[in-house]
Amino acid sequence: MKQTNDFSSKMDFLRKKVALVTGGASGIGLSVIRKFLENGVKGVAIVDVSENNTVEILSSLQEDYKDRIIFIKADVTKGNELRDAFEKAIEKFKNLDIVFNNAGIVNEVDWEKMLAVNLAAVMRGTFLAIREYLPKYKSSEEGVVLNTASILGINTIPNGVSYCTAKHGVVGLGKALRENESCKRHGIRVLTICPGVVNTGLLSAIVSENVEKLVEDLSVLCKLASSPDYIADCVLKIIDKGEHGSIWVAEDEEAPYEVVFPNRRELRKIE
């Protein structure tokens, strides 16, 4: 396994900033929160629907970071709860500079629920950030929205149709906002990260009519299942270097790379 600290970045941008992270009580979200705190953020709002292990997580973080963290229980699929999470973060820290829309599930049976979590909630969190909260509450000239998609937002697998659809939507959201006038006017960068297979609880919580086939599909996508800490290092790199509207892949414990999409006419099939 390659070491990741050769491309992790100690970013001045994070210092004294406030971040809101959905799906922050475990996996990628929790690893990113720890990296944010290590790199000097003023505060982090941990937003998650689950309270499992939250007491232990908060106790561990508070030993080192005291009142720089707040946990907000919220279902991101419910607009009033997500908005309330933004409001509570502002009430606690007075500012908001980074929104990481990261909550996600894998449920090919209840695909409507999965679309609600993995796509609709990401859109809602992005729109709240760029239209209302970051323009008003960011503490410097720049704000950042980072959305978690997947390599399955670029590629597809036969047994993950709904998951692929949702993640393609997240990638499309990031691309579509490249020319957004509000983002340009208010200095907000919208970035998208597409992780490969990551060794988190999400893998063991897959719901599908044929879990074995879905897992088999995933196993051939990447050389290895990356760690959440590796993805967190990639997040630092992407926030540090990523231009507004850029899409980044993070896989196989290697340095993240930006994806360039060709014009549709370049994709025309030659008869």
Image (cartoon, rainbow, N blue to C red):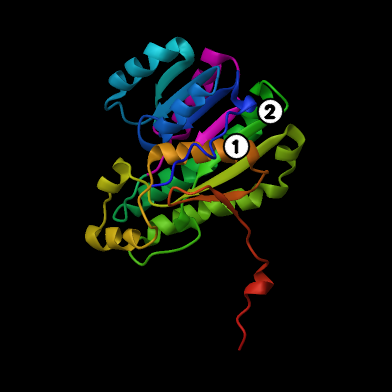
Q: Would you say residue 102 is visible in this rendering?
A: no
Residue 178 place in picture, x, y as percent? 68, 48
Q: Mark 1 packing: few (<14 Cα in 10 Å), some, or many (20+)?
A: many
Q: How many marks?
A: 2
Range of residues picked out in magenta: 75-104
Residue 107 place in picture, x, y as percent? 31, 51
Q: Is residue 223 above or below residue 9?
A: below
Tell me, yes or no, whether the highlighted magenta stretch contains residue 99.
Answer: yes
Q: Quadrant of residue 10 in the image?
A: top right
For disc 2, the marked residue is: 135
Q: Could you give the CA–CA distance between mark 2 and mark 1, rounded to whole angstroms?
A: 18 Å
| Residue 160: mark in rendering | none
Tell me, yes or no, whether the highlighted magenta stretch contains residue 196.
Answer: no
Residue 73 place in picture, x, y as percent? 38, 25
Q: Is residue 229 above or below residue 153?
A: above
Q: Mark 2 packing: few (<14 Cα in 10 Å), some, or many (20+)?
A: many
Residue 96 place in picture, x, y as percent? 59, 23
Disc 1 is placed on an element classified as helix
Comparing labels 2 and 1, the label whose residue is closer to the camera = 1
- Residue type beneath disc 1: Ile
Is residue 152 shown left or right of residue 49? right
- Residue type beneath disc 2: Pro
| Residue 239: mark in rendering | 1
Residue at 34 percent of width and 49 percent of height: 106
Q: Would you say residue 18 is visible in this rendering?
A: yes
Towards the viewer: 166 or 32: 32
Q: Earlier in the sequence, mark 2 or mark 1?
A: 2
Is residue 262 shown left or right of residue 166? right
Residue at 47 percent of width and 34 percent of height: 79
Disc 2 is placed on an element classified as helix
Q: Quadrant of the C terminus?
A: bottom right
